[in-house]
Image (cartoon, grey):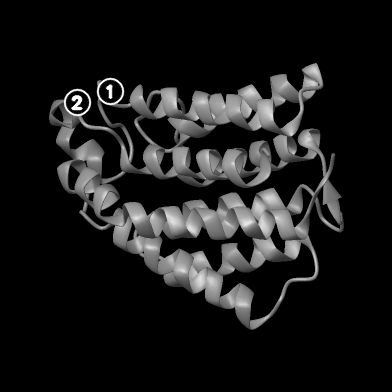
């Protein structure tokens, strides 16, 4: 079964709610290896994005994601705004003009978003960034699409893969961003960007997987 604009909007709102709920935890993670502002910045950006969607109802999936992208870029501080903004902009461009999406489309969207993040942040798996959670999630989605899995199985697999990728950042030495200044001292801490990226997949599974 296909998913519609309303389904995608439900996911975006679920993610915004999750960020609001976990903003202190995300900031706590960031306080250990960053600027202690990831949760606050992400919450500010996504609350503004939800207001923008409320102010002017988007006509299509790509326009909804573009609205989120532009709001995040303008309203979210630090690296999160440009990185997540790029993610959503690229994800939307992968389904430009489409009124509905299937699992294969979703996999293409998430891959396009990931490639945008990699291009913008110059990070790869093992650098202790959001890429560590997004990459295995996208790989799981691509495999699920190839296998013909339904939405529930595909998104559950992606969420599980993102969770594993998030936890895999704990022993890593950060190679990008503010955390990279700490060198060896960045070991033993879970990356906040990988954590918020896991929430992206977790809320997708809940909102779109049923």
Q: Residue at x 45, y 59 (%)?
A: 17
In the image, 65: left or right of 60?
left
Q: Residue 34, relative to residue 147: is it above or below?
A: below
| Mark 2 lies on residue | 187
Crowd tier of the residue under label 1, counting other residues whose Cα lies within 10 Å: few below 14, some 14–19, many 20 or above? many
| Residue 188 position in % (x across, y down) | 19, 26
Residue 33's label in the rendered image is none
Whether label 1 touches label 2, CB < 8 Å? yes
Percent from the top left, x then y, of residue 119? 55, 42
Q: Is residue 65 left or right of residue 150?
A: left
- Nearer the observer, 200 or 84: 200
> In whole angstroms, how far apart are the C-alphas of marks 1 and 2?
5 Å
Q: Residue at x 71, y 76 (%)?
A: 57
Residue occupying the far front of the picture: 210
- Which residue lies at the image location 81% right of the left edge and 21% below the top edge? 148
**Residue at disc 2, secondary structure:** loop
The mark nearer the N terminus, 1 or 2, is: 1
Query: Compared to 142, does 11 lie above or below?
Result: below
Picture coordinates of residue 38 (x, y %)?
31, 54
Residue at the disc numbered 1: 172
Q: Is residue 140 left or right of residue 159?
A: right
Mark 2 packing: few (<14 Cα in 10 Å), some, or many (20+)?
some
- Which quadrant: the N terminus? top right
- Quadrant where the C terminus is found in the figure: top right
Query: Furthest-left residue in view?
Result: 185
User: Could you say which quadrant of the image residue 29 lies in?
Assistant: top left
Residue closer to the observer: 202 or 192: 202
Image location (x, y in percent) of residue 42: 39, 59
Q: Along the line of sight, which residue is nearer the eye, 77 or 168?
A: 168
Which element carries disc 1, helix, strand or loop? loop
Give the residue drawn at x 44%, y 71%: 75
In the displayed structure, would residue 8 be above or below residue 121?
Answer: below
């Amino acid at each position: 079964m296909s998913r519609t604009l309303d389904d995608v909007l439900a996911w975006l709102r679920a993610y915004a709610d999750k960020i609001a709920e976990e903003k202190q935890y995300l900031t706590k993670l960031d306080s250990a290896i960053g600027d202690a502002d990831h949760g606050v910045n992400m919450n500010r950006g996504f609350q503004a994005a939800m207001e923008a969607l409320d102010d002017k109802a988007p006509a299509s999936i790509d326009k909804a994601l573009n609205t989120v992208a532009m709001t995040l870029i303008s309203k979210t501080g630090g690296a999160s705004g440009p990185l997540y903004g790029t993610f959503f902009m690229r994800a939307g461009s992968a389904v430009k003009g489409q009124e509905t999406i299937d699992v294969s489309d979703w996999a293409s969207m998430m891959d396009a978003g990931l490639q945008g993040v990699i291009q913008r942040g110059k990070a790869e798996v093992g650098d202790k960034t959001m890429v560590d959670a997004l990459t295995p999630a996208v790989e799981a989605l691509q495999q699920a699409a190839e296998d013909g899995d339904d939405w529930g199985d595909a998104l559950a697999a992606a969420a599980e893969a993102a969770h594993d990728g998030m936890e895999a950042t704990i022993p890593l030495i950060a190679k990008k961003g503010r955390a990279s200044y700490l060198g060896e001292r960045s070991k033993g801490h879970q990356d906040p960007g990988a954590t918020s990226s896991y929430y992206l997949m977790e809320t997708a599974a809940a909102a779109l997987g049923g």
